Image: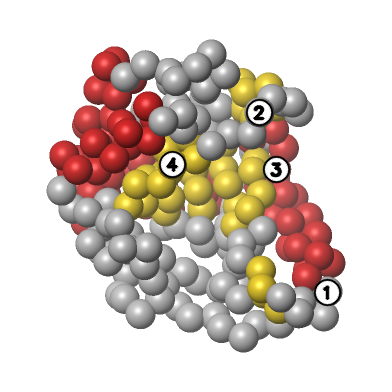
């Protein structure tokens, strides 16, 4: 199995990839967000030095009780972080020989205008699409830039609550959903080797809440 990225290929089997998360926002539900870019870069550096293979950067909270950040503001936050990202590759060192190096930079976003903007930066290798790929547009952009895409199971537009959605068989729902999304991404020009699947959050009693 392979993971195809713009300029390299990650081969499996290998040890699992470790993802560090950096929230460049001031309302992260996990409470660790910051609009101080020095702090954001320092956090990314510490995660890389601890062995992270992927750094996933989000410039907008996924909280559904907040309005969506304007596109230009989300792009500005990404831009400020991306200006400093290459410093990490130049000055940090891998923890061991199995760590992916340089680390994969992932952008957690959903609107195609932002996806296009971050991919044009040249540093982002993976789009973590929290919108669950409702159309093929984000996959088309990834294909055009050679980037991979992570598709998370979801039931509707981000920033909108979708509570108490239930299925009698969670696994059957995931299989149905991902077959549809893989076909959509491949039709947009991506190969299956450039697609990562995220089942989202599941809870007991065959209930999935997003």
Of callouts 1 and 3, which one flags the residue occurring earlier in the amino acid sequence?
A: 1
Q: How far apart, in angstroms, are the residues tagged by discs 1 and 3?
A: 26 Å
Q: Nearer the viewer, residue 207 or 105?
A: 207
**In the rendered structure, are the residues bearing label 1 and label 3 in contact, judged by CB atoms less than 8 Å apart?**
no
Q: Residue 81 lies in what quarter of the image?
A: top left
**How far across and down, in percent of the image, does residue 119 sit?**
40, 37
Q: Is residue 130 above or below residue 208?
A: above
- Residue pointed to by mark 1: 169
Is residue 135 visible in the rendered image? The answer is no
- Residue pointed to by mark 3: 186
Of callouts 2 and 3, which one flags the residue occurring earlier in the amino acid sequence?
A: 2
Q: Quadrant of the C terminus?
A: bottom right
**In the rendered structure, are the residues bearing label 1 and label 2 in contact, judged by CB atoms less than 8 Å apart?**
no
**How far across and down, in percent of the image, does residue 184 sit?**
69, 52
**How far across and down, in percent of the image, does residue 16 sit?**
64, 34
- Residue pointed to by mark 2: 15
Q: How far apart, in angstroms, are the residues tagged by discs 4 and 1?
A: 31 Å
Q: Residue at x 80, y 60 (%)?
A: 175
């Amino acid at each position: 199995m392979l993971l195809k990225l713009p300029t390299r290929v990650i081969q499996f089997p290998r040890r699992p990839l470790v993802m560090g998360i950096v929230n460049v926002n001031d309302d992260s539900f996990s409470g660790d967000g910051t609009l101080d870019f020095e702090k954001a870069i320092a956090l990314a550096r510490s995660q890389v030095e601890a062995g992270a293979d992927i750094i996933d950067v989000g410039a907008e909270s996924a909280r559904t009780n907040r309005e969506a950040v304007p596109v230009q503001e989300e792009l500005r936050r990404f831009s400020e972080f991306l200006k400093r990202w290459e410093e990490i590759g130049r000055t940090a060192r891998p923890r061991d020989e199995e760590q992916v190096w340089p680390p994969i930079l992932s952008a957690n976003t959903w609107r195609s205008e932002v996806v296009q903007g971050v991919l044009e930066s040249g540093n982002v290798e993976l789009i973590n699409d929290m919108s669950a790929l409702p159309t093929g547009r984000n996959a088309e952009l990834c294909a055009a830039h050679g980037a991979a895409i992570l598709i998370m199971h979801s039931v509707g537009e981000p920033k909108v609550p979708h509570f108490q959605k239930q299925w009698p068989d969670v696994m059957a729902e995931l299989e149905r959903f991902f077959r549809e999304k893989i076909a959509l991404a491949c039709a947009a020009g991506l190969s299956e080797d450039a697609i990562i699947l995220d089942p989202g959050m599941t809870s007991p009693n065959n209930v999935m809440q997003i």
